Image (cartoon, grey):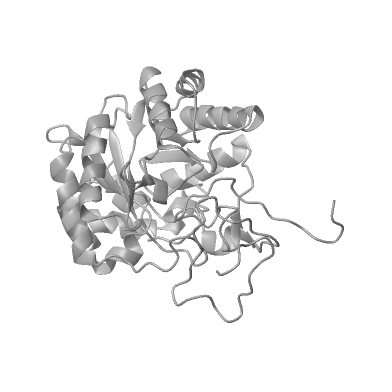
Amino acid sequence: MLVGQREVRGCAEDCGFCAQSRFAEAETPMHAMMEPEQILEHAKAAEAAGAHRFCMVTQGQGLSKRDFEKVLEGARLVAQQTNLKRCASVGHMSVARAKALKEAGIQRVHHNVETAESYYPEVSSTVRYEGRLRTIQAVEEAGLETCVGGILNLGESREQRVEMAFELARIDPTSVPINLLNPRPGTKFGDRDYMDPWEVVKWIAIFRLILPAALFRLCGGRVENLGELQPLAVRAGLNGVMMGNFLTTLGSTPDEDRAMFTDLGLNVGRHADNGANPRPDNRSGWLEGETPDLVEDYLDTLEQATDAGITVTLWDPGTQLRYAKKDKVPPRPDGAPNRWPDGRPETAEPLSGMPHGL
């Protein structure tokens, strides 16, 4: 035990895109495990901001029994006290755990393949691709909907992007979330450039052609990579976006996200069936008609929500995240260096425990 020195471990996995990894030199964003009541509070804020769906997310390959029970209780509260559709993203799981999530009110489980199988060893060496497929199979066996996607611009070739799209088509998930790399300095992919926005639009169209039946959503990195072309990406084949801010980075505001769809003449009203039917967004005629007044007159501003007795406290990683500097960073299991956009900053000294030559 070291007195007067703190060691920050971070997530035990080595995913090359993630600042939360203990193998990344980036400052580690620290998340405390929420209590069930806190999960409900965030769900109510998301509902008041106009979200249709709420996902409970944790880091790492899996959860302890105690933390899993917190997720289950949080899911029960959200199911009982909101009209949100409910998802969970809690790492690898057995069929028994997937069934427990379903009994608690979870309707869909998210578990990405991240990239094409042929490129996957470059992305992670501690989380096996086969393990990801086993979790997806367990979720299907439990009778839950699946949410499976990946990240573009990790260094994969164009052929490998197409490979991933056809792998997703074979899995046939209900929802396909696509992320665009937002490079985190001090990670394995920390020196990559953003994708050209027109290239992003093209790949959204390609994925939509290969996955015509899936609910296609754009998530992390869309603001940084697409900028003003986000509405064009919607036209290229999106059903929706992940609303607001992300785990460790900022996104658009909820009113900006809603306006992106309504300005295109699309209906952003909630579904009355609360996700009871598979692929509800793709039912014929569902996007026809005007957006209900409930959204435009009641949810557009924080003031209106406050007047109605709803306190809206949206997740803001810019102010609510606590970052911890690492005292020691172990060598990456794959031997690759961590990188920065313009090379290692002059103020960044190699941390103890790191391999030489980085």
The extreme front residue here reads: 356
Q: Quadrant of residue 29?
A: bottom right
Query: Which one is nearer the viewer's eye here, 180 or 302?
Result: 180
Query: Which one is nearer the viewer's eye here, 183 or 191?
Result: 191
Residue drawn where x is 52% and y is 49% of the image: 14
Number of callouts in the render?
A: 0
Q: Can residue 219 be seen in this view?
A: yes
Q: Vertical placement of 303 versus 43: above or below?
A: below
Q: Is residue 255 left or right of residue 320?
A: left
Residue drawn where x is 54% and y is 46% of the image: 13
Q: Is residue 3 left or right of residue 288?
A: right
Q: Residue 230 appears at what percent x and percent y?
A: 24, 61
Q: Vertical placement of 83 versus 163: above or below?
A: above
Q: Vertical placement of 177 versus 181: above or below?
A: above
Q: Residue 62 appears at what percent x and percent y?
A: 55, 34
Q: In which quarter of the image is the C terminus?
A: bottom right
Q: Residue 162 appears at what percent x and percent y?
A: 20, 47
Q: Quadrant of residue 149?
A: top left
Query: Which one is nearer the viewer's eye here, 236 or 148?
Result: 148
Q: Is residue 274 left or right of residue 163?
A: right
Residue drawn where x is 56% and y is 32% of the image: 71
